[in-house]
Image (spheres, rainbow, N blue to C red):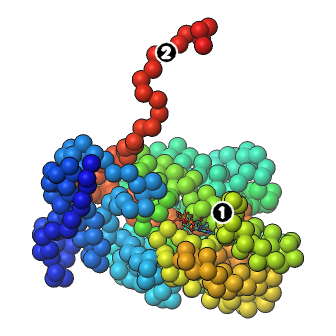
Amino acid sequence: MTVLILPTIQQDSDNSDFTQRRDMMEKATLIIDGKTYELPVVVGSEGEKAIDISNLRRMTGLITLDPGYANTGSCTSSITFMDGEKGILRYRGIPVEQLAEHSSFIETAYLLINGVLPTREQLNEVSVLFNDHSLVHEDMQIFYQNFPRGSHPMGILSAMVNALRSFYPELPAFGEEINITVIRLLSKVRTMAAMSYKISRGHKVVYPRPDLSYCANFLNMMFDTPVKPYPMDKDLVQALNVFWILHADHEQNCSTSAVRLVGSGRVNLYAAISAGIAALWGPLHGGANQAVIEMLSDIQKDGGNFRRAIERAKDKKDAFRLMGFGHRVYKAYDPRAKIMKKMCDKVLAKLNIKDPLLDFAKELEAAALKDDYFIEHNLYPNIDFYSGIVLRAMGIPTNMFTVMFAIGRLPGWIAQWKESIDDPKWKLGRPRQIYTGPKEMQYIPIDER
Ligand code: CMC
């Protein structure tokens, strides 16, 4: 079988908007066994192109095969733009660097979910709603208390977010009321995360305070105790704001795709987000921030021998990888990691902390960036490389790191879920496969085998 895909009619060269451009699409010509098929080419607002194969099987009887979906666009989206080669990340068009410098996490969440920056009045309204919905049903504490000691907080968070549906059954599937559900989820998730930490330590739960901002409230719920009030520090509150802004969305990554895929079965928002949390837990994805600290601690135990870690990462017979290095999309320095690295120095200086893990991290990074293997494979530090050190300095326990990532990613998951339900072409997610098992065989009764 011969297959050729040729770009044809180049109609579009102006900078008209995406909807206009969709109507004057380029076409790709696919030739299979001498038969020609024309496939539309979809062009995004930044000029990215995709061959639309949604009718391929109907037209040709063939499907595409793309393990890990590395070359597959699962949707069109107007939320986040990434250019992995140039190290660009923008939310609704705004560079993440600008948001990290000037915005707050809640303002960024509003931007992602609603598509525009809020006015001061809108932001105030949202803050009031956040306070109104910040408490968690008291009965939920019983659940927390009954998880076995040592349960991972990500498993607990995923289960508890799913359980919200039982506590708040009035959740509408669609429509106006969704806004309240969204606010409720964003507000409660931070209370739930802090509550699970307090309960895991056997401490009294601290309730949210209406006079504190989103990030300050979280730190207070985590660390305030009746004997030692939490000394609120505006620089740490700002560091947490930046940490969460940097994590707020990252287009169609593993957990976001899980949210969209699970959501496409028309489950409620809580169930879709719970699936996203479960997906994020993995060490190749959000769990990498915990894995980086564990790796750096192992290097410390190995007498600081970071070169051994590099050699192991290069050895194809060893499953070990440098955690916090590499990215499916970024083939240049992760723009979030640059900001995180600077923040790491700032937070440690502010708290007057000398963390030997930061020294190992810097030495490891410098050595890896000079190493031929890492250069050839375009492996740069990603956001998780430095984020764990920042969280450690703030006093966040290692097993809560991925929970911190999950709180940050929540606006992105919600925005992507909302975008999918508003899409008139929203379809059940259902990939196909190429079957490689046995051909038809006859059943053999058990005594004859
Ligand atoms: N250490 C050593 N080798 C690596 C690494 C690494 N961290 N990452 C990729 N490679 C190699 C890999 O062995 C392969 O080599 P070869 O082509 O010679 O067989 C090549 O690079 C491509 O790897 P891949 O696994 O096919 O690439 P991918 O796009 O699927 O990988 C990744 C992306 C993030 C899963 C991978 O880089 C990795 O495992 N990194 C470590 C875990 C990590 O830090 N994850 C956090 C990602 S950022 C947070 C988020 O957004 O989720």
User: Is 192 above or below relative to 210?
Assistant: above
Q: Residue at x 42, y 57 (%)?
A: 69
Disc 1 C-beta below 8 A from ligand 1:
yes
Q: Is residue 435 left or right of residue 22?
A: right
Q: Can residue 353 be seen in the rendering of this structure? A: yes
Q: Label 2 amino acid?
A: Tyr
Res 83 quadrant in image: bottom left
Q: Label 1 amino acid?
A: Lys
Q: Which callout, 1 or 2, points at the residue further toward the start of the chain?
A: 1
Q: Can residue 172 be seen in the rendering of this structure? A: no
Q: Residue at x 21, y 46 (%)?
A: 60
Q: Could you tell me which secondary element the residue under label 2 belongs to?
A: loop
User: Is 423 above or below relative to 389?
Assistant: above
Q: Residues within 10 Å of mark 2 (few under 14, many from 20)?
A: few
Write down which quadrant ligand 1 falls in: bottom right
Residue 443: image tag: 2
